[in-house]
Amino acid sequence: MEFTQRLPSEIFISIFKELDTKSLYSLSLVSKGCNTLAMDNHIWNHIALKRWEGKQGMAEICSEPHELWFKKTGTWKKVYSIIEQEARRSELNADDLVETTWRFKFNSFPIAHIGSPNFHRNGVYTCSGMMEGQLPWTFTKEGRVRVDQFPPLTPYRSTTDWSLKMRNVHVTLASIDHNCFRKKLYEFNLKFAEELGLDPSQYISRPPKPSFGVSNNSVEEVDENDDENDQENMENNVDNNEGETIMVLPSSNHVYDDDDDNNNENQSENDHYVIFLSFQN
């Protein structure tokens, strides 16, 4: 008799819940019984919610019951993998820019986050509270974001809270909230409900909405020290989250740390511009 059959499955599930994902994978190779237990939805539900706690864009997801994901064994593990893959994506697309609530700060000046940056689908950039008028924005061929004549912004993902960030020698833009994960799971839920022959409307409430409904007050209330804390938190997370690193576009040879004030090695002297300008229509 296989050892997993000698005790109630609830006991093994309680034990497996305390393991990390690497250990679960190793156990799944031991026997058929271990493989079945290692795919249990209640185990991966526990692991996922613990992993997602405090991560940007995950609060709404963590608060929902997700009854659909308990309909088939292994679904919570699959959802966990989808989120992990998305959390490692650093390349931004137009939806990411337009549908995200951004905050803005200068890298070299001890001032609070100012303005409310907005990227519009028609290629227009505005920053209310900081400048008047509007500027053009576009993607470079390397996938960076260029606003008017300023040095292009290199996108990357924070490993501390999974926020989206863009940075050049002068400024850093960081997301206050984004719906990257909600969009991924909405697409998955539609396909999964169809696969099971279920009515999606019974399990999926609504399509994800853009995150830029956050008020301007939220921008001002962001902790000004959060960027300085990112590096320390990332070092603490290395042992707990194997393989988790800040990812940048392949064209960039420099990995930005969130508190790196000296990342101008890829910027030429000709790329330095005056920041404090007022743009008129």
Image (tube, helix red, strand yellow):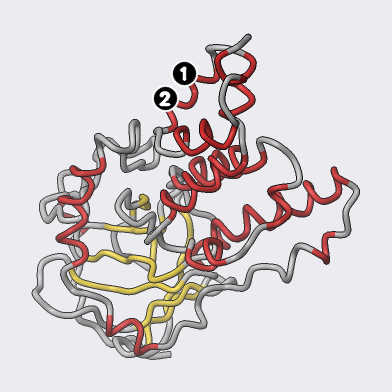
Camera-nearest residue between 208 and 112: 208
Q: Quadrant of residue 112?
A: bottom left
Q: In which quarter of the image is residue 108?
A: bottom left
Name which residue lies at 63% across and 9% down.
1
Q: In this view, does 199 lie to the left or right of 207?
A: right
Above or below, 50 against 135 in this view is above
Camera-nearest residue between 255 and 81: 81
Pointers 2 and 1 in contact (CB under 8 A)? yes
Q: Residues within 10 Å of mark 1 (few under 14, many from 20)?
A: few
Percent position (x, y) of residue 73?
70, 36
Q: Is mark 2 on a helix, strand or loop?
A: helix
Percent position (x, y) of residue 130?
29, 86
Name which residue lies at 53% across and 74% down.
120
Residue type (three-letter) at the residue carrying disc 2: Ser
Camera-nearest residue between 24 and 246: 24
Residue 26 numbered mark, or none = 1
Residue type (three-letter) at the residue carrying disc 1: Ser
Name which residue lies at 16% across and 49% down.
263
The residue labelled by disc 2 is 23
Q: Is residue 253 left or right of residue 92?
A: left
Give the quarter of the figure containing the C terminus: bottom left
Camera-nearest residue between 44 and 141: 44
Name which residue lies at 28% across and 87% down.
278
CA separation in Å, label 2 and label 1:
5 Å
Q: Is residue 197 left or right of residue 263?
A: right
Residue lying furthest right: 197
Q: In this view, does 173 lie to the left or right of 264?
A: right
Percent position (x, y) of residue 13?
53, 35
Percent position (x, y) of residue 86?
51, 46
